[in-house]
Image (cartoon, rainbow, N blue to C red):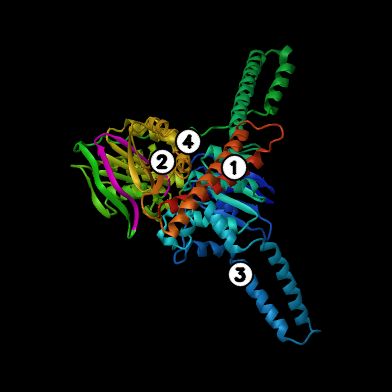
Amino acid sequence: MISINALTVAYGGFTLLDNINFHISESDKIGLVGKNGAGKSTILKLICGEQKPTGGKIEVPSGMQIGYLPQIMQHNKGKSVLDEALTAFARLYEMEDELNEVSLQLSSRTDYESKEYESLIIRMNELNDQLSILQSDDPIVLAERTLLGLGFKREELSRPTETFSQGWNMRIELAKILLGSPDVLLLDEPTNHLDIESIEWLESYLKDYKGSLVLISHDRKFLDNVTNRTVEIMLGHIHDYKVPYSKYQVLRAERIAQQRAAFENQQRMIEKTEEFIEKFRYKPTKSNQVQSRVKALEKLERIEVDVEDKAALNVKFPPAPRSGDIAFKASNLQAGYDSKVVFSDAEIEVKRGEKVALVGRNGEGKTTLMRIVMRELDPLNGQAKTGHNVNIGYFAQNQEDILDKQDTVFGTLDRIAVGDIRLKLRDILASFLFKGEDIDKKVGVLSGGERARLAMAKLMLHPYNLLALDEPTNHMDILSKDILKQALQRYDGTLIIVSHDRDFLDGLVDKVYEFKNGRVKEHLGGIDEFLRNRKIESLNELERKDKTPNTQSEKPKSEAKITENNGKAEFQEKKFLSKEQRKIKNRVNFLEKEIAQWEEKQRQVEEKLQNPGAGDDVMDLTREFLENKRQIDHLTDEWMELSEKL
């Protein structure tokens, strides 16, 4: 389908991609892997025509539709969420308008034998054929289904897109791409701003997707579940494996080990041959053997071991100046935007030297609190203040909006550095893997991971005593995450961090604030202790646990009491219920039974998934699991809404 031939990309004297070749076939689902800055995002831009190669070419069949989701994008404003998603059907609406116009012309013409009339008939048939293929379902139904799958609530579909965060706008763009039903999907880290429910929905969608897929992701599980082929980019070259990510790692290790073994054997053979040549070079009786071995060495195809990219971050935060005992304190805090309250009655205290994690579902207020800490947002009610002599270094999620795209890597630091630190800027950038000509790159050409590293490098310019980091690892590869974690463990200041990465937080934080249902709850201890107390295995399960009520132990508070009347127990309502309230109460009771039945079905499916039998289809079971889950969520949402009215 798509052929990439002798592709080369160079910036000045630096070659990013060096004469690479591979082919994307129908139904290929490729995981594109490699370190940050290796050229993964560049390949996607080249395929969809957003960037031109220095050499080589990419052959894309004419008429092929490509859907491209970049890491960083511009979001449209002025429409509701649903209306913006419906722009994906712009071509369909244009065809419908054209069909109406053609039909109108045919109805008004009488030159039935003319070529013009015949052309209109042909065009009408073409449009009808195309529309019959495209109109598999009502566009509004499809758009709503996709948006709900990506995590939007039905009541949010009418809200303007500009009232949502960047992460939610990314979901709208993803919905538009999926609704366009392209032949090829190019997705650059699509899971960065998704919660577990939306990731599972997208995972299920991509498994069933009939076209080709090229996916960039640092989520190993997602790659394993979605892809069937792995293309690795390393030091400008590619290595193509016809297996998912985990199997690729095993095969890659085996390939390197085999190369090294073959290389060492060949080197021993070459060494012995050279010893023979040197020893008998001047003996006439051995001249024929010597010449024969000299020619053999000249013809020998030398084995090379693939060079591995072992460059790694070298991060060490400056010592933190002493601050007051309390770094940040909030009392009776209510936060939100205009009339929308995100959370209320929060009591938060972060002491000097504490390392604190903020966890919870998307949209519960973690970033909102970060903005209050940074004084970018005022509380709606209550108090929030930083302590004495607290100097905050902030890493925001939206680095693409904060960094100047026209500035260079070096200029980004040079513009804000003062004093003696200016003499160390090149060393600081080198510790974050910006070396040589890298420092002259424009910020606009950097990958998401490189921008994250550059933003982290800015935190080295001042001795901050409180670091506020909002999803700092979103675009980082696994090695970079580990090194950053070690640096934060050694950091002697205060840390407030938003993250959904359990491995990253494990052993790093000593207190957790959980954002849930408009409230903020303090949990003392590390992330493992928090998860044990919540009886869950990962932070992602917070989204699952918080949406489904336990029908056995968490039923709505009873509105009834038991009184004694003539020795008999008599049930009386606490207060007189109106006809409408009785309807609601009956519906709530019905929903509780329904939820319990669906949960039992789900439990049976889970048992089969954990230990499938010979006749069980895992794909069918997975689909059934997700459908059951959606039904439980739908019933639960209605249960919660009605319960609040009683």
Q: Which residue is mark 4?
A: 478
Q: Is residue 511 among the parts visible in the rendering?
A: yes
Crowdedness of circle 3 by 10 Å Cα count: few (<14), some, many (20+)? some
Q: Nearer the viewer, mark 4 or mark 3?
A: 3
The main secondary structure of the magenta stretch is strand
Disc 2 to disc 1, C-alpha distance: 47 Å
Q: Which residue is mark 2?
A: 568
Dot 1 amino acid type? Phe
Mark earlier in primary sequence (2, 4): 4
The residue closer to the viewer here, 265 or 167, is 167
Q: Are marks 1 and 4 in contact (CB under 8 Å)?
A: no
Image vertical order of residue 251 relative to residue 71, above or below: above
Q: Nearer the viewer, mark 3 or mark 1?
A: 1
Q: Which residue is mark 1?
A: 625
Residue 572 point in image, percent of width and height: 39, 48
**Residue 344 lies in the magenta stretch:** yes
The residue closer to the viewer here, 190 or 457, is 190
Name which residue lies at 58% across and 48% down: 8
Q: Are marks 3 and 2 in contact (CB under 8 Å)?
A: no
Disc 4 to disc 3, C-alpha distance: 44 Å
Disc 2 to disc 4, C-alpha distance: 68 Å
